[in-house]
């Protein structure tokens, strides 16, 4: 039976309802039976996948019941009201009143909300909360205020709406009437989609299937981007790149602001390099002598800021004619149809836009940042397709991003890296979006991510530890100098060291982030996830606005007060375990910028240290395993450059474990799939965070020998090691060369050791000192120690500062803390040293920061305390 029904209401309003998928209905109404397609459908930003889903229509008097495999829509043909249910009859929502359409005030549609219902989405329209019930929002693209509005709203009851218009409009979520969700605008007809689902994860999957799956960006885009000062010269840019390499800070892309152009903010198609700041030899503009050639040799990609206000509608329609042989429909206002042929450009569109950028790409430019048309600047403009400025308000940047995407990929065969300063429904398929200079606007990013736009970023604040922490633990990471000087080499030593450590941490986690990006491209589930997305049943999740999940496994906090949901959580910086649900006041170490927790049960793939990406997948990949119950992880790999991943040229590796009682079983399946440049061999270096000291380890059913800690390289494939200081089992295994059999690892423990603190069953490690005392004077001493770990501390010096007798203080301290003052200071310094080494700080830097006279002295003390050298403790990957 047809998936579409048509009928007319008694007042002459025509209604068309279509089942566009097994879970999605499109509802339209107007006073013309023709229903020309509006811009989002006309230009393919909403795709209905071939004409509809299998649907049964049952006539019930003046009602008609549309039934698909997953949903039902009951429609009243007398007044246009409807009821949406799941296929099993579960009510999702219904009309609150007959829809209003065609009046002088435009249209309005109202849907009922239950008392407990909550709503999420709308892009970056809202910046102070993620739960949107009670708000009335204008969906209007504006600089800073709302760069990427998305008229998509999903309910905690398992349904969602998408308003199908490119004009500004309004959505009222129980603000005017407490139990009503309504939306309306100035059009004479309405058009929207109703999506049935389960949780928000399902709704995001179905929404992005309708509007376009998020792009997997080139792999180097997930590294670090640095944007130079807008008045930088070519020499300045080269120096920026050299300083990254000199400081040992990984970085992949350097961007130029509008000052690169011969004319500042040149909107024309005649852009040239600034003749003084960026002199490119005319006789060799593509050769190795250019500053771009120098950047390429250092491993950097180059990005350019673009200014655009050309008629994107003309170019898009010309492209449709060229590829389909037919002229596109005019859209929702047939009276404004183009009178000229598509081959006749309007004034100002003499040249196809991307064509004037090809020369820059040939010279070595790899990415673009787009500043485009603003509605407020051209309120009376009529575009080449006959649309008004208001109709084009939300369409323009979609067309621009797609044309840039199409032009770059067509010219190079590589994935486009486009940053857009604005966006709308469907932008996720073509570009990343930049949220502006707000630095720590987490909520804006989370709302975009809950609206399908998973590749959103905000600039990093490099002059604060919290800014570095947040800036590196996003989907994308960018430092923007703009008119200032923000290169990390110009930071004070402490912040520089922190910046370097976070950059290295991010680059080690690239396979984890990249796999999450692949998952987003398949399901719409973002890399950065609001706590509501991950913990929908936790009543506190809506109020957790200063923390989020990065992928499945990492919880990132922006303040020291963190809420841990149910489960076991491991403090990345200290290794301490905490059981949720609980609110935790974290004490973030001085070398970190904020809380970071790993969810027990995680599997985190890591890469070896590198200065930049895009060098191909390494043969050796680390696996950080945090056993808890059972879990499975999927590692995605591709060539990182081309669109072959859309043709399923991807290697997928399934990794799982099961932990029961005194046994742990890990299984690594052979890689499934192929891609260009895929390593023939694959080695895995496992770091298993043990609950107890192992009694045996089997590899593919055969016992594997235990090597002592000082036996040499831990990457030997014929043995394993156990590091008592970090409670790590380390071993290296090789994929089956024939890719026929999985790698199987079994770990056995003595059942009496399970659950016992490692310190009680490991010889040679000193007991942890007490963290506090009830004595006010001793608390002051502890504070002095915490603040003075970077220098030599003596009891006599502390006593002088506190104006007390040193002998009395010595006796009191030992009585209260259980150990002498000198032993306490040593314990604190050694714990801090361990944390810094595990965070990949250099041994010399650790020695300096803890007040040792030289590295040799520090190494001797460390080895005596921990029973191993600092170099032996360090290992690649996240927390040990």
Image: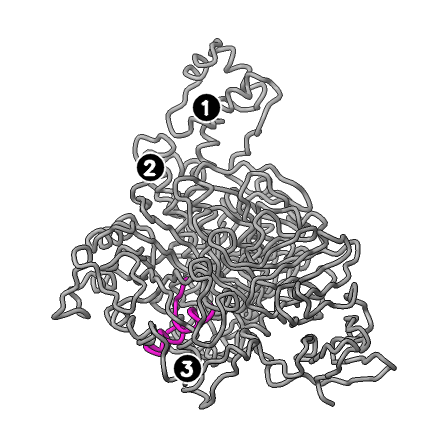
- Disc 1/disc 2 C-alpha distance (Å): 30 Å
Q: Residue 854 sits in which quadrant?
A: top left
Q: Can you say which quadrant of the picture contains the N terminus?
A: bottom right
Residue under the image location 74 percent in, 68 percent down: 99
Q: Secondary structure at mark 2?
A: loop
Report crowding for label 2: few under 14, some 14 to 19, many 20 or more residues within 10 A (C-alpha): few
- Disc 1/disc 3 C-alpha distance (Å): 76 Å
Residue 211, position as x, y percentages in the image: 56, 72
Q: Secondary structure at mark 1?
A: helix
Task: Name the mark on residue 822.
Answer: 1
Looking at this view, is 680 or 267 the one in front?
267
* Residue 722 against residue 847 in the figure, above or below: below
Residue 483, position as x, y percentages in the image: 31, 46
Report crowding for label 1: few under 14, some 14 to 19, many 20 or more residues within 10 A (C-alpha): few
Please say whether residue 428 is one of the residues in the magenta stretch.
no
The prevailing secondary structure element of the residues shown in magenta is: helix
Q: Residue at label 3?
A: 319
* Residue 148 against residue 406 in the figure, above or below: above
Report crowding for label 3: few under 14, some 14 to 19, many 20 or more residues within 10 A (C-alpha): some
For the magenta stretch, what is the residue range? 398-419
**How many marks can you see?**
3
Q: Residue at label 2?
A: 492
Colour logic: one colour
Residue 772, position as x, y percentages in the image: 58, 26
Comparing marks 3 and 2, which lies closer to the viewer? 3
Task: Name the mark on residue 335.
Answer: none
* Residue 30 against residue 854 in the figure, above or below: below
Please say whether residue 403 is one of the residues in the magenta stretch.
yes
């Amino acid at each position: 039976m047809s998936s579409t029904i048509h009928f007319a209401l008694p007042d002459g309003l025509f209604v068309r309802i279509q089942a566009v998928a097994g879970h999605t209905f499109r509802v339209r109404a107007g006073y013309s039976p023709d229903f020309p397609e509006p811009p989002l459908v006309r230009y393919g930003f909403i795709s209905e996948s071939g004409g509809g889903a299998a649907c049964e229509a049952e006539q019930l008097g003046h009602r008609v019941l549309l039934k698909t495999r997953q949903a039902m829509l009951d429609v009243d043909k007398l007044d246009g009201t409807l009821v949406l249910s799941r296929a099993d009859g579960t009510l999702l929502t219904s009309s609150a009143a007959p829809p209003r359409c065609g009046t002088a005030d435009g249209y309005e549609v109202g849907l009922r909300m239950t008392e407990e219902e909550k709503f999420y989405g709308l892009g970056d329209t809202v910046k102070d909360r993620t739960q949107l019930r009670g708000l009335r929002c204008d969906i209007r693209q504006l600089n800073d205020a709302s760069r990427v509005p998305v008229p998509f709203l999903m309910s905690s009851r398992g349904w969602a709406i998408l308003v199908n218009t490119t004009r500004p409009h309004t959505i009222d979520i129980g603000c005017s009437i407490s139990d009503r969700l309504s939306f309306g605008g100035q059009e004479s007809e309405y058009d929207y989609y109703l999506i049935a689902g389960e949780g928000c994860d399902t709704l995001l999957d179905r929404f992005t299937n309708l509007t376009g799956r998020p792009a997997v960006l080139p792999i180097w885009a997930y590294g670090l981007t640095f944007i130079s000062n807008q008045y930088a010269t070519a020499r300045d840019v080269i120096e920026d790149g050299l300083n990254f390499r000199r400081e040992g800070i990984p970085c992949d892309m350097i961007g130029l602001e509008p000052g690169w152009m011969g004319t500042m903010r040149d909107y024309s198609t005649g852009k040239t390099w600034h003749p003084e700041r960026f002199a490119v030899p005319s006789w060799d503009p593509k050769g190795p002598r250019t500053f771009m050639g120098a950047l390429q040799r250092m491993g950097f990609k180059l990005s350019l800021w673009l200014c655009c206000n050309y008629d994107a509608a003309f170019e898009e329609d010309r492209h449709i004619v060229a590829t389909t042989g037919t002229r596109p429909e005019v859209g929702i206002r047939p009276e404004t149809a183009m009178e000229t042929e598509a081959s006749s450009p309007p004034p100002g569109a003499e040249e196809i836009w991307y064509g004037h950028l090809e020369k820059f790409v040939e010279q070595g430019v790899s990415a673009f940042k787009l500043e485009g048309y603003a509605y407020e600047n051209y309120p009376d403009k009529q575009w080449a397709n006959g649309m008004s400025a208001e109709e084009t308000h939300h369409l323009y940047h979609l067309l621009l991003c797609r044309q840039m995407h199409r032009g770059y990929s067509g010219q190079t065969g590589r994935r486009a890296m486009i940053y857009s300063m604005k966006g709308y429904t469907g932008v996720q398929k073509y570009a990343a979006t930049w949220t502006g200079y707000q630095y720590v606007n987490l909520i804006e990013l989370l709302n975009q991510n809950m609206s399908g736009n998973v590749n959103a970023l905000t600039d990093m604040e490099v002059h604060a530890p919290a800014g570095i922490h947040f800036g590196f633990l996003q989907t994308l990471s960018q430092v923007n100098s703009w008119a200032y000087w923000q290169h990390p080499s110009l930071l004070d030593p402490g912040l520089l060291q922190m910046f370097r450590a976070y950059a290295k941490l991010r680059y080690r986690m690239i396979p984890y982030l990249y796999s999450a990006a692949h998952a987003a491209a398949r399901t719409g589930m973002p890399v950065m996830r609001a706590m509501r997305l991950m913990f929908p049943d936790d009543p506190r999740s809506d109020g957790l606005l200063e923390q989020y999940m990065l992928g499945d496994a990492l919880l990132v906090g922006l303040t020291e007060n963190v809420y841990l949901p149910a489960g076991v959580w491991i403090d990345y910086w200290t290794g301490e375990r905490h059981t949720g649900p609980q609110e935790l006041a974290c004490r973030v170490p001085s070398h970190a910028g904020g809380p970071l927790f790993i969810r027990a049960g995680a599997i985190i793939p890591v890469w070896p240290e590198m200065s930049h990406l895009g060098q191909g997948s390494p043969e050796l990949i680390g696996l950080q395993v945090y056993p808890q119950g059972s879990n499975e992880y999927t590692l995605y790999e591709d060539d990182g450059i081309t669109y072959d991943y859309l043709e399923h040229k991807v290697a997928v590796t399934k990794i799982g474990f099961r932990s029961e009682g005194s046994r742990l079983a890990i299984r690594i399946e052979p890689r499934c799939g192929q891609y260009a440049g895929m390593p023939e061999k694959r080695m895995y270096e496992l770091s298993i965070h043990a609950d107890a000291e192992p009694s045996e380890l089997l590899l593919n059913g055969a016992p594997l020998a235990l090597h002592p800690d000082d036996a040499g390289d831990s990457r030997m494939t014929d043995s394993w090691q156990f590091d008592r200081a970090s409670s790590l089992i380390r071993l290296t295994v090789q994929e089956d060369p024939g890719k026929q059999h999985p790698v199987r690892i079994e770990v056995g423990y003595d059942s009496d050791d399970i659950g016992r603190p490692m310190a009680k069953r490991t010889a040679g490690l000193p007991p942890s000192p007490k963290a506090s005392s009830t004595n006010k004077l001793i608390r002051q001493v502890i504070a002095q120690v915490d603040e003075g770990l970077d220098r030599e501390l003596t009891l006599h010096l502390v006593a002088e500062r506190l104006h007390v007798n040193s002998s009395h203080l010595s006796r009191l301290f030992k009585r209260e803390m259980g150990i002498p003052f000198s032993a306490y200071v040593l314990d604190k310094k050694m714990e801090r040293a361990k944390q810094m080494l595990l965070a990949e700080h250099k041994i010399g830097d650790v020695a300096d920061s803890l007040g040792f006279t030289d590295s040799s002295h520090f190494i001797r003390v460390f080895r005596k305390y921990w029973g191993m050298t600092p170099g032996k403790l360090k290992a690649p990957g996240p927390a040990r």
